[in-house]
Amino acid sequence: MFRGFYTAASGMIAQQRRQDLLTNNLANVNTPGYKADQASLRAFPQMLMSRLGETNMGDHSVPTKKQLGTLATAVYMQEALPKFKQGDIQETGNRLDVALLQGAVPTDEETGTQGALFFTVQNEAGDLRMTRNGNFSVDANGNLVTSNGDFVLDTNGNRIVVGGSDFEMDSNGFIPQANAQVNVALVENPNLLEKEGNGLFRLEEEAGFGSAIGNPDVSYQLKQGFVERSNVDVEQTTVEMLNAYRTFEANQKVLQAYDRTMEKSSNEIGRLG
């Protein structure tokens, strides 16, 4: 009985965490370059249930065992991985907005994981980060920065000084006014990226990344005056939220049934003794 109690409770916890994830996706539907998270639910190892008994064989008994089947123990949300599918491109007319259109990108033959392209940015502490949010601005020193103040880097790893918002950028990211080209990074396995908030991703040092500039296996285009929208599917996310709620509710009812059974056992059966 207690095993079923904990199984239902674990299902409620998993669905609550899934609901939180989906709610966060929906809240960022209008965030440029946002990549929706997807939940991965896993079950704990199943148990093989058997019934023990005995069979009379003349003057003695022989133990028997009959397999009844498997029993699930619990479920949990193992991880949340972003979907790096390209979001819709929206024209804004703002020269500071830059959309990264991803074309051909290599796919790892062993894992089947497709690589992804990102802008490379640097925070005040000098740490390198990746982002698809091209909603840029210009700081007081004329540096091209992201909406949260991180510096956009060029192909040499330097900050790009544009002076003001009146600058031109070609489809390769070259800015004549700054004599610099916006760097586009190729991450071969984007599943190794960790979300850091504000549309930023952190990459573990051992994973590494390369530049898409000059890579014959990569094609992309930068569009000034456009922005990449989030890749959140509102309708699908809403359906998944309802499904998570119904599953949570079903587990809750099972939990309440176990609770009533335990209460009855402790009150009535104990009284008979």
Image (cartoon, rainbow, N blue to C red):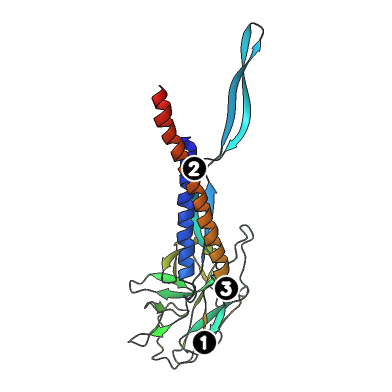
Contact flag, marks 2 and 1 (Cβ < 8 Å): no
What secondary structure is marked by label 2?
A: helix
| Label whose residue precedes the other's in the sequence (3 or 1) | 3
Q: Can you give x and y, in whole percent of width and height, for residue 131 in the image?
A: 47, 73
What secondary structure is marked by label 1?
A: strand
Residue found 62% across the figure and 65% down from its top: 107
What residue is disc 3 on? 86
What residue is disc 2 on? 7
Q: Could you tell me the amino acid type at mark 1?
A: Gln
The relative height of residue 251 versus residue 119 in the rendered view (above or below) is above
Give the distance between the C-alpha atoms of the residues marked 2 and 3, in whole angstroms. 38 Å
Name the quadrant containing residue 157.
bottom left
The relative height of residue 208 versus residue 98 in the rendered view (above or below) is above
User: Which is more toward the observer, 190 or 87?
Assistant: 87
User: Which is more toward the observer, 68 or 1?
Assistant: 1
Name the quadrant containing residue 216.
bottom right
Q: Could you tell me the amino acid type at mark 2?
A: Thr
User: Which is more toward the observer, 20 or 272?
Assistant: 272
| Label whose residue precedes the other's in the sequence (2 or 1) | 2
Decide if residue 91 is on the left or right side of residue 135: right
Q: Can you give x and y, in whole percent of width and height, for residue 39 in the image?
A: 52, 58
The number of numbered discs placed on residues in the rendered structure image is: 3
What residue is disc 1 on? 224
